[in-house]
């Protein structure tokens, strides 16, 4: 069994998916992010069945980088409760698995996260404006206090 994980999340649209993919690669928390074609998701949220269009992301990372990846996704994701699922990779091309490990080493992550949270960056990420209803894909928007606590959690990962 390898240390590699395939992480799955969904974004509300292609622009948000591309921004997330770019941020994860820039921060070295993912070696590769595949943005798939839009799909239709059906789920129950707050006792109501919702159906919405989403863009899946397949993210390749390592178990040692997972906490950093999860923090980065949560900090930038527009959903209150984003789908973040990690599936262990049991086998793969050894050279590819080694590349994923090399691209997501903790030293690179710490350096990239410090840069992204520097005073000049404001420690924030951007995402598209939410619909007028205040909801994205059936989820209520997360509050500013949630974003601040996630940024703090993300920054604390940098100190490890």
Image (cartoon, grey):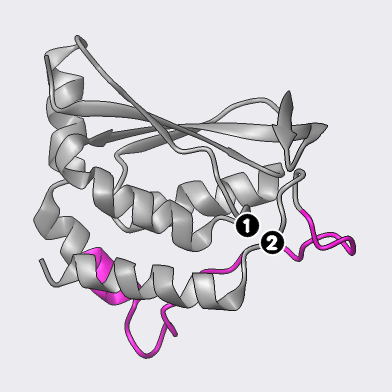
Which x, y percent locates residue 55?
65, 34
**Depth order, front residue of 92/150:** 150
Is 149 situated left or right of 60 in this image? right
Q: Is residue 95 above or below residue 58?
A: above
Give the magenta-colored segment's residue range.
112-135
Circle 1 is placed at which residue position?
Answer: 78
Residue 143 in the figure: left or right of residue 103: right
Q: Residue at x 81, y 63 (%)?
A: 134
Relative placement, left or right, of 67 versus 78 is left
> Does 128 lie within the magenta span?
yes
- According to the picture, the residue beneath numbered tag 2 turns out to be 141
Outermost front residue? 47
Q: Between tags 2 and 1, which lies in front?
A: 2
Give the camera-side residue of 42 and 64: 42
Task: Give the main secondary structure of the magenta stretch.
Answer: loop
Is residue 77 shown to the viewer in this render? yes
**Dividing the image into 4 quarters, which one contains the C terminus?**
bottom left
Marks 2/1: CA–CA distance? 7 Å
Query: Where 25 falls versus 114 (above or below)?
Result: above
Which mark, by number, is residue 97? none
Residue drawn 44% across and 85% down? 122
Q: Say whether residue 124 is visible.
A: no
Q: Is residue 102 left or right of residue 67?
A: left
- Disc tally is 2
Expressed as whole percent of the image width and height from the top left, the position of residue 1 reads: 11, 14
- Image quadrant of residue 102? top left
Verify CB contact (< 8 Å) between mark 2 and mark 1.
yes
Place of residue 116 in the rendered image (x, y in percent of width and height, measured from the top left): 35, 73
**Along the viewing direction, whichever of 110 and 132 lies nearer the viewer:** 132
Circle 1 sits in a helix, a strand or a loop, which is it? loop
């Amino acid at each position: 069994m390898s240390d590699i994980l395939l992480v799955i999340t969904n974004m509300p649209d292609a622009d948000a998916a591309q921004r997330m993919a770019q941020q994860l690669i820039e921060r070295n928390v993912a070696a590769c992010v595949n943005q798939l074609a839009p799909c239709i998701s059906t789920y129950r949220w707050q006792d109501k069945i919702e159906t919405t269009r989403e863009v899946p992301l397949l993210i390749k990372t390592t178990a040692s980088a997972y906490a950093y990846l999860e923090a980065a996704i949560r900090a930038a994701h527009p959903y209150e409760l984003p789908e973040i699922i990690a599936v262990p990779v049991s086998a793969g091309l050894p050279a590819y698995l080694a590349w994923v490990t090399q691209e997501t080493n903790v030293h690179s992550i710490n350096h990239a996260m410090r840069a992204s949270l520097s005073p000049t960056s404001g420690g924030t990420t951007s995402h598209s404006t939410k619909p007028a209803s205040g909801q994205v894909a059936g989820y209520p928007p997360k509050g500013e206090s949630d974003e601040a606590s996630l940024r703090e959690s993300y920054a604390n990962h940098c100190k490890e």
